[in-house]
Amino acid sequence: MVKPDKAAKKPENEVKEKKMGSLAKRTLAALVMLPVVIGALWVGYPFIDVLALVVGSLLAWEWANMASSRGSSSYMVAYIISLAVALLVYDTTALVSAIILASLYVWFKSAKEEHRYILTLGVPYIAIGMGSLLWIYHDVFIYHPYDFYMTLWFMLMVWAMDIGGYIVGCNLKGPKLAPKISPNKTWSGLIGGIVFAVAASTIYFYLLSLLNVVKVDAKSQIFFAVLGGIIAGVSQIGDLIESAIKRKLGLKDSSHLIPGHGGVFDRIDGLIFAAPFVYWLFAYALEY
C-alpha cells in the first residue's frame, strides 16, 4: 500500500516538473526573441519596420482565428491592410480612413458571427497598438542611438512589470486583482511589477549615465523612474484586457506559436496597449 504522504507528494512533484518544463521553454524562447528585437532596434530601418509588420501580421492571424467561427482569412486581410497603413504610411488622414473602412468592412462581414464586437475591435487595436511602437521609435525619439535607448527603456518597463508581477505575485500571493478576469493576478503582483519597473528604470539610466551613453541628471532619472512605474501600471491594464477577451472567447492562450509563452498577443498585450499612451505622452503632453 502507498503511504498517504507519498501519494500526496506525487502530484506536487508532477506540478513542479511541469512548471520547470514550461520555464525552460519560456527561457529558450526568450533567448531567441530578445536578440532579434534588440538587434532590430539598434539597426533601425528597414529591419525594425519589417519586424513590426511580421509580428503585427501574426497578431492579425491570431485575432482572426480566435474570434471568428466562420472563416478568418477575410478578417485577417482587413487587419493587415490597416496595420500596413499604420506602419508604412505616415499620414494621419490615410490612417484614420484605413481604420474606419476596415472596421466597417469587418463589422458588416461579421454580421452572423458570435463575437462581432471583438472581431471589429481587432482593427484599431492592432493598427494603433503596433503602429504606436514604430511611431515612438521613428517620430518621437528620432535621432540614433537615442531612438534605440529610449524605445528599449519603454519595453524594459513593460517586461519588468511582467517579470516582477510574476515573481512577487507567485511568492506573496494575497488578494486577487481581478478574479473574474484573471484569477492568478494579485495586488501584490501589480505592486511588485511596478516596483520592479521603477528599479529597472533607475538602474538603466544610471548605467547609461555612468557609461556616458546618454546624459541623464538625477532629477530626470527620478522623473523617468516614476514614469516607468506609470507605464508598467498601464501595461497591466492591457494584460487584463487581453485576459478578458480570451475569457470571453473561452481560450487560455491566443495561440501556440511561441513555446512556453502561448501566442504573440500573450507576449505583447501590455506593449501594444501602453504604446499609444507613451506616444501621446512624449509627442504631445510632455516637453523634454
Image (cartoon, helix red, strand yellow):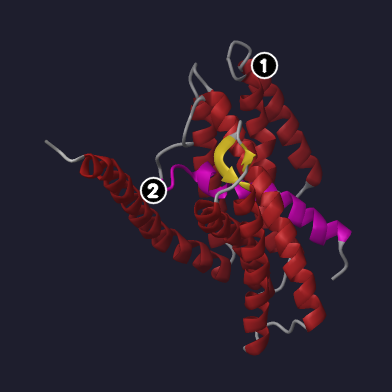
Q: Secondary structure at mark 1?
A: helix
The total of numbered circles placed on residues is 2
Mark 1 Cα shell of 10 Å, populated few (<14), some (14-19), many (≥20): few
The residue that label 2 is drawn on is 260
- In this orientation, which residue lies closer to the viewer: 115 or 93? 115
> Which residue of the protein is positioned furthest toward the top in this rendering?
112
Q: Residue 58: x, y in percent?
A: 49, 42
Q: Which mark is residue 108?
A: 1
Mark 2 Cα shell of 10 Å, populated few (<14), some (14-19), many (≥20): some
Residue at image position (80%, 45%) is 92
Q: Is residue 85 visible?
A: no
Answer above or below: position of 273 versus 151.
Answer: above
Q: Range of the magenta residues?
A: 258-285
Please state if 14 lies on the left or on the right of 284 as rendered.
left
- In this orientation, which residue lies closer to the viewer: 279 or 256? 256
Proximity of marks 1 and 2: CB atoms separated by less than 8 Å: no
Quarter in which the N terminus is drawn: top left
- Magenta portion: prevailing SS class: helix
Three-letter code for the amino acid on which mark 1 is drawn: Phe
Three-letter code for the amino acid on which mark 2 is drawn: Gly
Q: Is residue 267 magenta?
A: yes
